[in-house]
Amino acid sequence: MHDYDKLYIGGQWCAPRGQDVIEVSSPFDLKPVGRVPEAVRDDVDAAVAVARGAFETGSWSRLPASERIAVLERLLDLLTPRTDELADLQTSEMGAPTTFSRAVYGPGPAGVLASTIAIAKSTDWEEIRPGTTGLDIIVRREPVGVVAAIIPWNSPLFTLVGKVAPALAAGCSVIIKPSPETPLDANVFAELATEAGVPAGVISVIPGGRDIGAYLVNHPGVDKVSFTGSTAAGREIASNCGRNLKRFSLELGGKSAAILLDDVDIDIVTAGLKFASLANSGQACIAQTRILAPRSRYDDIVEALGAMMAGLAVGDPFDPSTDVGPMVAKHQQDKVNSYIELGLAEGAQLVTGGLDPFPDLPTGWFVRPTLFSGVNNSMRIAREEIFGPVLVAIPYDSEEDAIRIANDSEYGLAGSVWTSDRERGIEVGRHVRTGTFGVNQYLLDFNAPFGGFKASGVGREMGAEGLSEYIEYKSITPPPAG
């Protein structure tokens, strides 16, 4: 059990101003996992005040970058040995299969932190440029200020480090607002950061729901908002930040396409889509849930995908044989099942899965891995993000038609192409309007920018581009020397 009766504000455990508690239960067996106080507005005010104070006094923001990097290196040394423990915490909190947590989101946070450290070391924090007037210009990279980092429930620690590591490297103070479904990881990380040497005031954790998130976003003491979550919430955050001329970056939803070309090896693609489309039980913004198959091979591909999905093991997320765990909560189970009902109502054909309950799983928020065929791209199940183990197979007539369908979406976060011809795959990738794309696989590289086109977001995380999201640029023009 991870039980907390205080809030982590500015590097210290503080009594909460409110009385409510967030109870965290396993989505598999509904047993308690932990609890944290639910923050109220006074707690947000306190966190912003200490973050603002730390930033203005320069205990972190004005340190040489080399000293901040040294603290992050100590944090990496503390974080790395706890990889499996933190992966298991994600499995407990949100039901991610343990094979996924330990292979991907367990080592992922340390990998992102290590990449951020390397990028920060190679960054020229102050440079001299020749000016057009004949004077040299000093160009400085300075921290943006106090950052509100709003974290989703589906990959909490991984997403947290992707925001907090570059913010700290840049010299910002950070207020972390974890999701109420998964608030525990953030406290562990904040404690490790303080142990590594991050000064008082620089990191706070404010667990709460949407009302607290909205209050934090609109707080006048916050300079920048970094949000990962739904497109609907992202639009509201962008509107509020724009009104207040506040910096923001958004990593939002997706409805990504996996394009299977006519020369594809069906066995390879079904194995690859088990991860690219269904990782984390389909609760991933990058999931490729629209399967675009050539009409000439459509039936064979649908049959193979259906067989793969029908054979997935659904159950205890701590069982290494489990492929698909529960949805994070009943509200997510209800949402995914409502889309399965919608697909049937829209006239799509159910290949496997559906709404039948699991008689051998008496508890847990489970959804059957579901594949629809006979889908066209105008159906809601092909256009809206479902965020569960539900795939739709859409036929196409030519390579150009496949690219058109892939781009016919309000989203543009991820995608892939599957082919026996590497160069053909790369060329297809050049024409799909999406932030990340894979050929015969889908992987995130921590040194590369991650983010979306269109309604999938604004800005980038990871890579040098992710660090730049937390930087302001200042030009200083001195008089000639001497």
Image: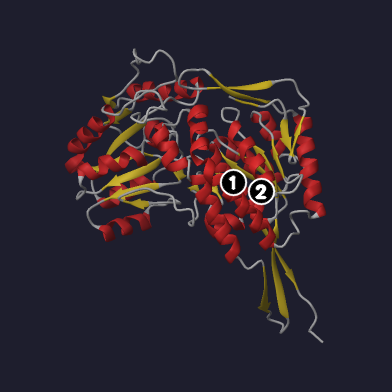
Up-down relation of residue 360 to residue 179 (above or below): above
Label of residue 222 in the image:
none
Of the pair 373 and 354, the residue shown nearer to us: 354
**Is residue 1 in view?**
yes
Is tag 1's residue or tag 2's residue first in the polypeptide sequence? 1
In this picture, residue 19 sits left or right of residue 404: right
Query: Residue 174 appears in which quarter of the rendering?
Result: top right
Instruction: Where is residue 359? Give x, y as percent.
Output: 34, 12
Quadrant that contains the N terminus: top right
- The location of residue 413, given as percent across then percent down, is 45, 46
Question: Looking at the rendered structure, which numbered label has been put on residue 196?
Answer: 2
The amino acid beneath tag 2 is Ala
Could you give the CA–CA distance between mark 1 and mark 2, rounded to whole angstroms? 7 Å
In this picture, residue 55 sits left or right of residue 395: right
Q: Residue 287 versus residue 394: which sits nearer the camera?
A: 287
Q: Residue at x 48, y 41 (%)?
A: 106
Asked whether 458 or 479 is in front, the reply is 479
Is residue 202 shown left or right of residue 81? right
Q: Is residue 131 above or below residue 85?
A: below
Left or right of 251 in this view: 364? left
Mark 1 residue type: Leu
Report the colour scheme: secondary structure
Q: Quadrant of residue 297?
A: top left
User: Do labels 1 and 2 touch, CB within 8 Å?
Assistant: yes
Identify the residue position indicated by label 1 in the image. Answer: 78
Q: Residue at x 53, y 40 (%)?
A: 82
Q: Residues within 10 Å of mark 1 (few under 14, many from 20)?
A: some
Q: Secondary structure at mark 1?
A: helix
